[in-house]
Image (spheres, rainbow, N blue to C red):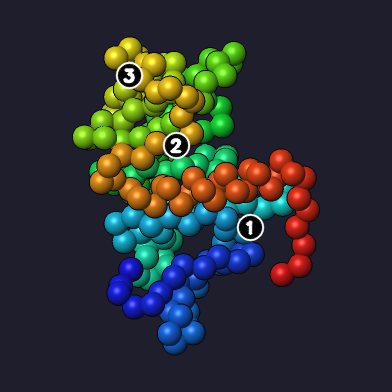
Amino acid sequence: MSTANEVYLGQKNSVARFNLDTQKSLWSKVIDGSPSIISTYDNKVLVQSSTIWGKYTHYLLDAQTGNQIWATEVIGCWIVPQFHKGNIFFTNAKGAVCKLCGVSGKLLFQTKFKKWYDQSSYVLTVAKDKIYILSKKKSFQVEIESGKCIEAPELANFAADHLTFGLGNGVDQMALFSSIAIAAAAASADAGAVGGGE
């Protein structure tokens, strides 16, 4: 994004790049559902939207033009994206670590690491060109190409309490805001909020 006073705004069925000084949109893109989380990385915009029927769609757009690079429904949930070397890493609602191709939107791997009975809270982070899944009790290093999760016992029990968020130093800072938005959306859903209006 340029140094102009610009923001990305979402509303039902659209997302736009908007100049606050001129009060005009530079571009607008029609999408399915309502965008709830917007992240930027390397002149790209990742838009996470959902419909009232629970259909999640993730769009990758060119930040300058708004042109769609790809759209996918394969993710199926809100994510905290970790961008690394042009690809998107995340954990999904099924306890799997996933890698999405930043060019095509194709799911490159989905590796289950969490057992059904495991109550641990895991966070995904990138540090020194390595992908980690961390928790208080058990941690893994993820092989970047295959998705194989290798237990890292040296990283177990290093935290006094359960982990709630992870962000690599000098890596995608926008993941922080995605995490906050996901937490807020989950809190309102848990409270049984019913939306309406504009």
Residue situated in front as seen by the camera: 189 or 47: 189
Q: Which residue is mark 1?
A: 33
Disc 2/disc 1 C-alpha distance (Å)? 27 Å
Query: In x, y percent, where is residue 51?
Result: 67, 53
Residue 1: % across, % down: 33, 68
Q: Could you say which disc has been placed on residue 155 in the image? A: 3
In the rendered image of this protein, does residue 198 appear above or below residue 172? below
Q: Give the residue type at disc 2.
A: Phe
- The reply to whether callout 2 and callout 1 are in contact (CB within 8 Å) is no
Q: Residues within 10 Å of mark 3 (few under 14, many from 20)?
A: some
- Provide the secondary structure element on which disc 3 rests: helix
Whole-Å distance between the Cαs marked 2 and 3?
Answer: 15 Å
Residue drawn 31% across the image and 31% down it: 131
- What kind of element bears circle 2? loop
- Residue located at (78% from left, 53% from top): 194
Q: Which mark is residue 17?
A: none
Q: Amino acid at mark 3?
A: Leu
Distance (Cα) linking label 1 and label 3: 40 Å
Residue occupied by mark 2 = 165
What is the three-letter code of the residue carrying label 1?
Answer: Gly
If you read the primary sequence from the N terminus, does the residue marked by circle 2 or circle 1 appear first?
A: 1
Q: Are marks 1 and 3 in contact (CB under 8 Å)?
A: no
- Whether residue 143 appears in this view of the structure is yes
Q: Give coordinates of residue 89: x percent, y percent.
A: 38, 37
